């Protein structure tokens, strides 16, 4: 039997972790604000010929993520201030603030749960949309990630409402749903990231087979794979840790749960910044193996992934490169391969020397 003294000690420890999580979350949010400002600057500079419908989707989502995260942080701050205020002490007859912070029936805590769920869903939806674009708008490819996202939405909605209205759903069933929330999200994230990396890697292999290397205007395909995978790993690791601490019912849950919300938008902003910095790398040069003077047909795609240049822009001094409709010109994480509005005139990929 657990004594009242042991319960009080556990409550104090959990309260310390909750406060640590709040301040770490605020720190991550501050870093996210800086990343957001830089990413907005990059997006504004990209407007014009790059402003396609898919780029608009990512831009709108970037702003929406920041707005929702800011609202989340504001509500979180208000509930922490109330929990440590004399008002709560009077209302609760001297209970510790942690009792309010884990009270899911309160309006502030319910709003926090809903906002966090929406942020996760929005981040997952953007990742699926990026996979959809990279795979040339192939719905069959994203059916499995969409199914997992749908399961996640239904699961989280049931859990949220069950916590808001205790007793409506059997407690054991609710706990079972809670235990599978993060595994489903982790599976969906890994599947989506794997599909994106596989597609880009496949095009990288084709570009090598065609004899193409790199050019100064785009970003190497391997660089894109590294950026996407490393960024996805941050979100995945957070969810894996949360999955473990939820299963163990550790107070560390408050720490990692607090930094999850601002890290979602920060990851997408970081991708934008890293891709833009990779484009400015002076070591990126376009090279071709020795070629004869007669035009010849090449298949495959160049080893580049210009995420901002809608036309792909092949250049090599005196060499002339024509992009054909049968050629996958490159990978744009916002637009995928070239669509009809951006595709160069039909032809075959040739290279001539003057």
Image: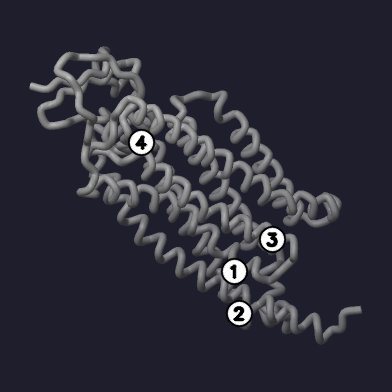
Q: Name the residue under label 2.
A: 84
Q: Can residue 339 be seen in the rendering of this structure?
A: no
Relative to 91, 1 lies left or right: right
Residue at 64%, 33% (x, y): give it. 147
* Residue extending furthest toward the right: 1
The correct choice, above or below, for 82 with respect to 351 in the image is below
Q: Which of 179 and 234 is in front in this view?
A: 234
Q: Distance between the residues labelled 4 and 2?
A: 44 Å
Q: Which of marks 4 and 1 is nearer the N terminus?
A: 4
Identify the image's colour scheme: rainbow, by chain, secondary structure or one colour.
one colour
Q: Earlier in the sequence, mark 4 or mark 2?
A: 4
The correct choice, above or below, for 168 with respect to 219 in the image is below
Q: Nearer the viewer, residue 313 or 257?
A: 313
Q: Earlier in the sequence, mark 3 or mark 2?
A: 2
Image position, residue 7 (x, y; %): 80, 80
Image position, residue 336 (x, y; %): 39, 30
Q: Mark 3 points at which residue?
A: 244
Badge 3: how crowded within 10 Å, few (<14), some, or many (20+)? some
**Mark 4 or mark 2, whichever is nearer to me:** 4
Q: Name the residue under label 4.
A: 55
The correct choice, above or below, for 250 with respect to 179 in the image is below
Image position, residue 320 (x, y; %): 16, 23
């Amino acid at each position: 039997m657990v004594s009242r003294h042991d319960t009080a000690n556990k409550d104090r420890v959990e309260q310390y972790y909750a406060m640590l999580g709040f301040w770490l979350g605020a720190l991550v949010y501050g870093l996210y604000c800086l990343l957001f400002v830089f990413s907005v600057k990059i997006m504004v500079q990209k407007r014009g010929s790059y402003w396609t419908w898919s780029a608009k989707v990512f831009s709108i989502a970037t702003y929406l993520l920041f707005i929702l995260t800011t609202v989340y942080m504001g509500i979180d701050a208000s509930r922490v201030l109330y929990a440590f205020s004399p008002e709560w002490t009077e209302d609760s007859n001297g209970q510790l603030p942690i009792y309010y912070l884990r009270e899911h029936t309160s309006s502030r805590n319910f709003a926090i749960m809903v906002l966090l769920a929406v942020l996760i869903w929005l981040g997952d939806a953007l990742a699926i949309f990026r996979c959809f674009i990279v795979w040339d708008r192939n719905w069959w490819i994203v059916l499995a990630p969409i199914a997992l996202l749908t399961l996640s939405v239904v699961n989280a909605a049931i859990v949220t409402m069950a916590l808001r209205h205790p007793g409506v759903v059997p407690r054991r069933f609710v706990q079972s749903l809670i235990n599978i929330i993060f595994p489903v999200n982790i599976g969906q994230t890994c599947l989506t990231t794997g599909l994106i990396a596989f597609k880009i890697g496949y095009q990288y292999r084709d570009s090598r087979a065609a004899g193409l290397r790199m050019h100064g205007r785009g970003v190497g395909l391997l660089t894109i794979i590294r950026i996407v995978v490393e960024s996805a790993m941050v979100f995945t690791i957070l969810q894996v840790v949360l999955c473990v601490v939820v299963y163990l019912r550790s107070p560390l849950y408050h720490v990692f749960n607090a930094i999850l919300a601002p890290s979602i938008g920060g990851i997408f902003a970081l991708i934008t910044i890293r891709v833009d910095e990779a484009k400015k790398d002076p070591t990126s040069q376009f090279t071709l193996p020795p070629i004869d003077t007669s035009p010849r047909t090449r298949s495959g795609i160049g080893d580049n992934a210009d995420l901002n240049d809608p036309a792909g822009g092949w250049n090599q001094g005196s060499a002339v490169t024509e992009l054909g409709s049968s050629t996958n010109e490159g990978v744009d994480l916002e637009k995928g391969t070239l669509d009809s509005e951006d595709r160069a005139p039909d032809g075959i990929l040739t290279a001539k020397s003057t």
